[in-house]
Amino acid sequence: QVQLVESGGGLVQAGGSLRVSCEASGRTSSSYGMAWYRQAPGKERELVAAISSGGSIYYADSLKGRCTISRDNAKNTVYLQMNSLNPEDTAVYYCAARRAGTIKYDYWGQGTQVTVSS
């Protein structure tokens, strides 16, 4: 079992930057694939970026070119650095984890709100 706690959300002006963090606890999280999803009001949850246990990275089109996902296994923490934010990036950002060798994200954090003002 893995527990995920996001932090770092908040209010930022358009064009600004924000870094959200996800701290994992429980079973050895370094062997888990991690991802960031987001869900805007009235929209479905969508993948933003993912990083495997081996460090392979995937960026979805939603924030591609404007975000960087990284992980610090010593701190059991995954980060999402977001730049050049615009109001359409306003959403609840969720951290997710999947066991190595699986494709489904079984563990989810409670989410952190990111609001971008115009």
Image (cartoon, helix red, strand yellow):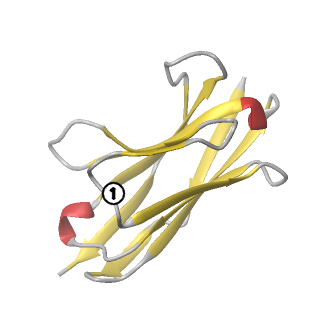
- The quadrant the N terminus occupies is top right
Side of 18 relative to 89 (left or right):
right
Residue 88, given in percent of the width and then of the height, sits at 18, 63
Determine whether 105 is above or below 17 in the image. above
Determine whether 62 is above or below 82 in the image. above
Give the amino acid type for the residue marked by disc 1 in the picture.
Lys
Residue 44, given in percent of the width and then of the height, sits at 22, 36
Residue 73, given in percent of the width and then of the height, sits at 78, 48
Side of 20 relative to 1 (left or right):
left
Residue 24, given in percent of the width and then of the height, sits at 71, 43
Q: Going 70% across and 52% down the picture, which residue do you hit?
A: 77
Q: Going 82% across and 32% down the picture, which residue do you hit?
A: 28
Instruction: Look at the image and tell me whether residue 6 can be seen.
Output: yes
Q: Residue under label 1, please give it.
A: 64
Q: How many marks?
A: 1
Side of 51 relative to 26 (left or right):
left
Q: Going 61% across and 36% down the picture, which residue do you hit?
A: 52
What is the crowding at mark 1: few (fewer than 14 residues within 10 Å), some, or many (at least 20)? few
Q: Quadrant of residue 115?
A: bottom left
Q: Going 52% across and 69% down the picture, which residue do you hit?
A: 19
Side of 50 relative to 27 (left or right):
left
Instruction: Look at the image and tell me whether residue 109 can be seen.
Output: no
Mark 1 lies on a secondary structure that is loop
Determine whether 33 is above or below 99 in the image. below
- The quadrant the C terminus occupies is bottom left
